[in-house]
Image (tube, rainbow, N blue to C red):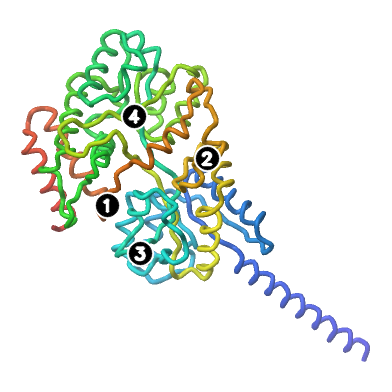
């Protein structure tokens, strides 16, 4: 009898343990957010830090599980899940490149959670909010800025006969003249990128004038796009005069060309300052200013954007409400968090209230005690908003396919841009 009682008691205890474990697991699942992001030196530690800030402010703790996932893998896995109808294995929150957002919002309607009623988007940079808006609803919480400027080596420019004052308020034609002098008088490359793949220059130029690859009807807009026409001629002159070291701008050899002291100038975003700063032996030798400005294009400014990303919540996430609450509290409301990631990670957010903190007023000894974060943040608020459309990558590919023929004189400017439009239409089935 005792054996029976003991056996029943043991079974009861085991059952109780199983129930407790199941409950703990369920609670953990309910308080856990899975996030897909790339870059273990930037986006991933920042999101992990966001979880720490949330737990510091809330009694109910959550676990933010950040899964390292490349941008390409992220898109591939999301598309597979969306098209198959299988949501299992998808994240609660996903980081998305700003250039891709409109593509996914329009092609996968209903897959991302609407956020307009939950988050005050008036507190973010307008151009970022516009990019995350589809059919008058905002779906993306803006994150980092791609506010862009011109970085340059003061020692190389001085050797070529130019002062920091000479570098202010440049036009692109003046920029080219300086580049020719730098190469001739110093023997240094002026820039580092492959001209026939220099679509990032075209994108900087377009957004500086409030234009993009597409018109208001989302038709390809190259041949009659004044910013494209003006910038491809600038690229041809860079190519003809061999001003750019021909290395992939985004690859290690492109970065190395800058950090090794091979080049005198870089047109890029605020996030590139971390790369420049990594060359500690060049401290005090770099300065920055506004981008050069287009001359023939109406409404051109010296302000533009390159890159940047935003956070989206999947609509079918079982933790959707928690995910939205988390993003609202930290990425749309915690100024201390933004100050922290600025100083620790070099991240310039697009949440406007955070730009008034002490961190933005910190002097950067690498750039001769200039207020680099304050300056780029102020420029950010002047960036013209544009609609990146659904097929930016297809437009990039179409343009790259014909640029070299234009550089080589095989095609005129009009012929090249018309062929690029035809290639785009063939790619997209227009």
Q: Earlier in the sequence, mark 3 or mark 1?
A: 3
Which quadrant of the view contains residue 148?
top left
- Name of the residue lying farthest toward the right: 2
Q: Quadrant of the C terminus?
A: bottom left
The quadrant in which the N terminus is found is bottom right
**CB atoms of marks 2 and 4 within 8 Å:** no
Using the image as rendered, state which of residue 22 and residue 273 is in the foreground. 273
Rendered position, 285 above or below 107: above
Spatial CA distance of label 4 from label 1 is: 23 Å
The label on residue 387 is 1
For disc 4, the marked residue is 290
Quadrant of the rendered structure where residue 13 is? bottom right
Comparing labels 2 and 4, the label whose residue is closer to the camera: 4
46 or 205, which is in the foreground? 205
Distance between the Cα atoms at labels 1 and 2?
A: 29 Å
Q: Label 3: which residue?
A: 137
Q: Secondary structure at mark 2?
A: loop
Binning the other alpha carbons within 10 Å of mark 2 as few (below 14), some (14 to 19) or many (20 upward) gives few
Checking the image for residue 41, the label placed there is 2
Q: Which mark is residue 361?
A: none
Neighbor class of circle 3 (other Cα within 10 Å; few <14, some 14-19, many 20+) is some
Q: Which badge, 2 or 4, is on the more N-terminal residue? A: 2
């Amino acid at each position: 009898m005792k054996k029976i009682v003991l056996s029943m008691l043991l079974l009861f205890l085991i059952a109780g343990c199983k129930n407790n474990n199941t409950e703990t697991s369920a609670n953990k699942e309910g308080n856990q957010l899975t996030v897909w992001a790339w870059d273990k030196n930037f986006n991933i530690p920042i999101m992990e830090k966001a979880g720490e800030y949330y737990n510091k402010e809330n009694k109910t703790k959550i676990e933010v599980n950040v899964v390292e996932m490349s941008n390409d893998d992220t898109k591939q896995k999301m598309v597979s899940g969306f098209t198959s109808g299988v949501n299992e294995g998808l994240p609660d929150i996903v980081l998305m490149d700003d250039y891709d957002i409109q593509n996914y919002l329009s092609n996968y309607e209903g897959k991302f959670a609407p956020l307009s009623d939950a988050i005050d988007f008036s507190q973010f940079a307008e151009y970022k909010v516009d990019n995350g808006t589809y059919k008058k609803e905002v779906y993306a919480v803006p994150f980092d800025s791609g506010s862009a400027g011109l970085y340059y080596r003061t020692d190389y420019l001085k050797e070529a006969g130019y002062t920091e004052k000479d570098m202010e308020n440049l036009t692109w034609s003046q920029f080219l003249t300086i580049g020719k002098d730098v190469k001739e008088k110093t023997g240094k490359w002026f820039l580092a990128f492959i001209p026939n793949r220099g679509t990032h220059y075209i994108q900087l130029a377009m957004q500086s004038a409030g234009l993009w690859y597409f018109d208001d009807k989302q038709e390809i807009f190259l041949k009659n796009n004044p910013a494209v026409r003006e910038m491809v001629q600038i690229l041809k002159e860079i190519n003809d005069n061999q001003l750019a070291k021909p290395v992939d701008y985004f690859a290690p050899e492109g970065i190395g060309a800058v950090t090794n002291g091979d080049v005198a100038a870089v047109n890029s975003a605020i996030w590139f300052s971390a790369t420049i700063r990594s060359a500690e032996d060049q401290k005090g030798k770099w300065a920055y200013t506004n981008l050069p400005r287009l001359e023939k294009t109406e409404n051109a400014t010296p302000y533009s954007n390159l890159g940047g990303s935003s956070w989206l919540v999947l609509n079918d996430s079982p933790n959707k409400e928690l995910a939205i609450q988390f993003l609202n509290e930290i990425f749309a409301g915690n100024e201390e968090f933004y100050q922290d990631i600025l100083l620790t990670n070099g991240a310039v957010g697009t949440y406007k209230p955070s730009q008034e903190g002490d961190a933005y007023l910190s002097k950067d000894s690498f750039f001769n005690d200039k207020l680099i974060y304050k300056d780029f943040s102020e420029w950010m608020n002047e960036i013209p908003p544009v609609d990146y459309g659904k097929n930016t990558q297809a437009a990039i590919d179409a343009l790259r396919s014909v640029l070299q023929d234009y550089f080589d004189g095989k095609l005129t400017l009009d012929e090249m841009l018309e062929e690029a439009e035809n290639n785009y239409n063939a790619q997209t089935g227009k």
